[in-house]
Image (cartoon, helix red, strand yellow):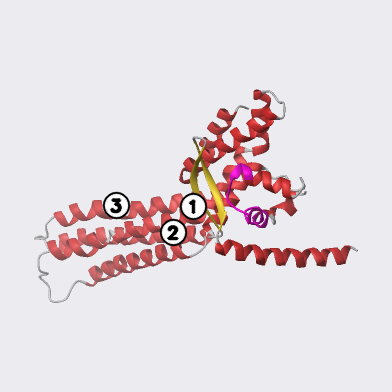
């Protein structure tokens, strides 16, 4: 195999986070090694093949790099999930606080309280689990991120149902609460789910 | 050298060859081969994941350097790396003495 073909195979297999630096170092290494074999008397083609052979299997190296970079990658995924879930503050609190008309009832209907409780506790659980994922080992962080994303889904869904139910209870409620809250919730939960899926992929690679 | 034995010793080998100064990846592999008189013949590409791990642990530091128009990543031992090398070397010496005594 030529050095260029080997580097192309490495590029295909490597995690994106380390690709640039590692490929530059690998190319330097392979060209140095090939040059040394040429100096020892091999022809350039055989020298390149020998250098590639000594460097090792591209699959094995990519696997090791994935394992080495997993802790950083998973911690970053947890950070992204945490930021994404932070967005739920807007549809769960900021948007209704600013757009809802004054409640017409003395005592809020019980089921709305339950829905709000589920939305808020799900959100807090999702944040706590994402924060936990930043602190623990990748093998534990990935399931924590999955649980965080699930809690985020429950929270987002409960928030959305609450908004619709509020609209039905209080006809003067503007639809903009749902119209603004829904894409924000989807973005927040989508970020958390995406981060969890990515972290699981990195850990199981 | 059997790969199982090598696996546990790569980190200390890398720290050890860098104790005298900076080196880039290919030179590090050469130094390991030279200093072990060929006994440790590493699969060369697997040195880099180990170097990255040691760098993340703060035992190595690295920087790009341009030599003869080529940019190379050179690695050096940090203060923490030196302390770690001393500690691991003591462990290896104790292990080696114990194995020597057991197999004598």
Q: Secondary structure at mark 1?
A: helix
What residue appears at the point 43 percent right and 54 percent down from the top-left corner?
Answer: A196
Q: Residue A145's mark? A: 2
Q: Earlier in the sequence, mark 3 or mark 2?
A: 2
Highlighted range, magenta: B11-27
Q: Relative to residue B42, is residue A200 drawn left or right?
A: left
- A43 or A100, nearer to the observer: A43
1 and 2 marks in contact (CB < 8 Å): yes
Residue B91 picture quarter: bottom right
What residue appears at the point 53 percent right and 60 percent down from the top-left corner?
Answer: B58
Q: Secondary structure at mark 2?
A: helix
Report whether residue A4 is seen: yes
1 and 3 marks in contact (CB < 8 Å): no
Of all chains, the one bearing label 3 is A
Q: Name the mark nearer the viewer: 1 or 3.
A: 1
Judging by the rendered image, the residue that carries numbered circle 1 is A200
Does mark 2 fall on the same chain as mark 1? yes
CA distance separating discs 3 and 2: 17 Å
The stretch drawn in magenta includes residue A189: no
Q: Secondary structure at mark 3?
A: helix
CA distance separating discs 1 and 2: 9 Å
How many residues crowd mark 2 within 10 Å: few (<14), some (14–19), many (20+)? Answer: many
Farthest residue to the bottom: give it.
A106
Of all chains, the one bearing label 2 is A
Does mark 3 fall on the same chain as mark 1? yes
What residue appears at the point 58 percent right and 50 percent down from the top-left corner?
Answer: B22
Q: Where residue A169 appears, x then y in whole percent?
A: 15, 64
- A146 or A76, nearer to the observer: A76
How many residues crowd mark 1 within 10 Å: few (<14), some (14–19), many (20+)? Answer: many
Number of marks in picture: 3
Q: Where residue B39 appears, x then y in whole percent?
A: 77, 48
């Amino acid at each position: 195999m030529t050095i260029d073909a080997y580097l192309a195979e490495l590029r295909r297999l490597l995690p994106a986070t380390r690709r640039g630096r590692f490929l530059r170092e690998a190319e330097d290494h392979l060209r140095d090694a090939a040059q040394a074999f040429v100096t020892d008397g091999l022809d350039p083609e055989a020298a390149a093949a020998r250098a590639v052979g000594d460097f090792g299997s591209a699959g094995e190296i990519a696997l090791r790099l994935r394992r080495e970079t997993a802790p950083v990658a998973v911690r970053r995924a947890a950070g992204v999930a945490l930021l994404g879930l932070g967005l739920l503050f807007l549809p769960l609190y900021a948007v209704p606080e600013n757009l809802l008309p004054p409640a017409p009832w003395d005592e809020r209907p019980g089921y709305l309280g339950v829905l709000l409780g589920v939305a808020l506790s799900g959100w807090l659980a999702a944040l706590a689990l994402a924060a936990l994922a930043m602190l623990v080992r990748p093998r534990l962080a990935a399931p924590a991120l999955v649980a965080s994303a699930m809690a985020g889904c429950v929270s987002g869904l409960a928030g959305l149902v609450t908004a619709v139910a509020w609209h039905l209870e209080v006809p003067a409620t503007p639809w903009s609460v749902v119209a603004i809250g829904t894409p924000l919730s989807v973005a927040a939960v989508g970020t958390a789910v995406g981060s969890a899926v990515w972290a699981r992929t990195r850990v199981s690679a | 050298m059997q790969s199982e034995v090598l696996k546990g010793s790569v980190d200390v080998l890398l720290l050890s060859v860098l104790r005298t100064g900076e080196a880039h990846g290919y030179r590090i592999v050469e130094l390991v081969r030279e200093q072990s008189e060929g006994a440790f013949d590493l699969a060369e590409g697997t040195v880099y994941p180990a170097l990255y791990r040691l760098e993340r642990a703060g035992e190595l530091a690295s920087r790009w350097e341009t030599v003869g128009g080529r940019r190379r990543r050179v690695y050096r031992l940090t203060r923490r790396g030196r302390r770690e090398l001393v500690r691991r070397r003591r462990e290896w010496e104790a292990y080696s003495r114990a194995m020597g005594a057991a197999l004598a």
